[in-house]
Amino acid sequence: MANSTIKGAFSIHGQNPQFLVETVIRNRIYDCNYWKEHCFALTAESIIDKAIELKYIGGVYSNQRPTDFICLLLKLLQIQPDKEILIEYLQAEDFKYLRALAAMYIRMTFRGVEVYELLEPLLKDYRKLRLRDMSGYSLTFIDEFADALLNEGRVCDLQLPRLPKRDVLEENGELGPRKSMLLDALEGKEEKARRSESRSRSRSRSRSRSRSRSVSPARGRSRTPTSDAGSRYVSRSPSRSRSRSRSPAGSAYRSRSRSISPDRMQTD
C-alpha cells in the first residue's frame, strides 16, 4: 500500500502517474532508505518541509542510487496534489528547491499550454542550484533548469512526456507570443529616456520662467533714472514761473508812467 497511488487519482497521459518514472528507477526508489524513512505517509502539506531540506537536484548518482529530489518527485506523483497547490509551490520564491521540484512535476503532468505559461517566468530566475549526477556535483541555475525542461527530452535521468512546439500552439491560437526579455529591457530603457527628457524639458521651462521674472525688475529699475530726470526737469519749472511772475509788476510800472497827463508835466 505504501507504494501504490492514492484512490481516485486521475490518469496522466493515459497511464498511472507513477509510471511516468521508468520502472528500473522506480524500483530503486522503492528500495532506498530515504523513501522508506522520510517519504512514508507524506501529504501535500508535509512534503513542503522535506522539499525545503533538499540540498541538490538530480536523478541517480553513484551506483544508480536515486536522489532525494527524485524520491520526492515520485511521492508527488503518488499523492497527486491539486493544481492550485502545485502553483503555490512554484511561486514560493524563497525556497528554490521546492520551486524546482514543482517545475519538474508540472512539466511531467500538465498540458503543454500550462507548461509554457508556468515555466517560462522561471527563465528570469538566475539563482544557483546544485546538481548531483553520475559524475558528482555540479552547479546549474534555475533558468537553465527551466530551459532544459522546455527544450530537452530527458532531465534528471527521466524521460519527459512529449511537449508540443510553441510555434504550433501559437498558430492554433492556444498560446500568445512570447515576450522577449531583451525587448522588455529596451522598452524600460526607452521609458527611462522619455522620463529623463520630460524632466529636462520641465526643468528648462522652469529655469526660463525664473530668468524672465528676474529680468523684469531690472527693466523697471532702468526706468527710474528717467523718472528722476523728469522730476528734476519739473522742479526747474518754478524758477521760470517766478521770472514770469515778475513781468506783470514791470508792466504795471510802465502803465503808471504812461498814465501821467501832459498838463501835470507842464506845471512841474
Image (cartoon, grey):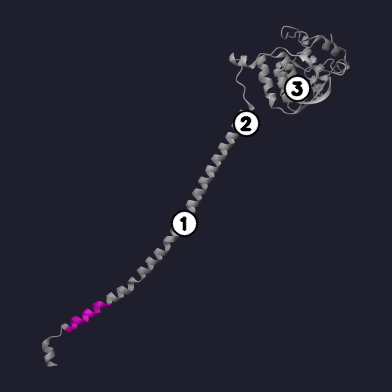
Label 2 sits on what residue type? Ala
Q: Which residue is mark 3?
A: 100
Which numbered circle lies on residue 217?
A: 1
Residue positioned 84% across, 21% down in the render:
135
Which numbered circle lies on residue 176?
A: none
Asked if the residue under mark 1 is in contact with the one under mark 2, i.e. CB atoms within 8 Å, the reply is no
Residue positioned 47% across, 55% down in the render:
215
Q: Residues within 10 Å of mark 1 (few under 14, many from 20)?
A: few
Label 3 sits on what residue type? Ala
Residue positioned 77% across, 23% down in the render:
98
Residue 50 magenta? no
Residue 250 drawn at (x, y percent): 23, 80
Q: Where, by quadrant of the figure, is residue 241 drawn? A: bottom left
Give the label, 2 or 3, closer to the camera. 2
Q: Which residue is mark 2?
A: 185
Viewer-nearest residue: 171 or 240: 171
**Which residue reaches farthest bottom?**
268
Q: State how far apart marks 3 and 1 are (Cα).
A: 71 Å
First reached walking from the N terminus: tag 2 or tag 3 = 3
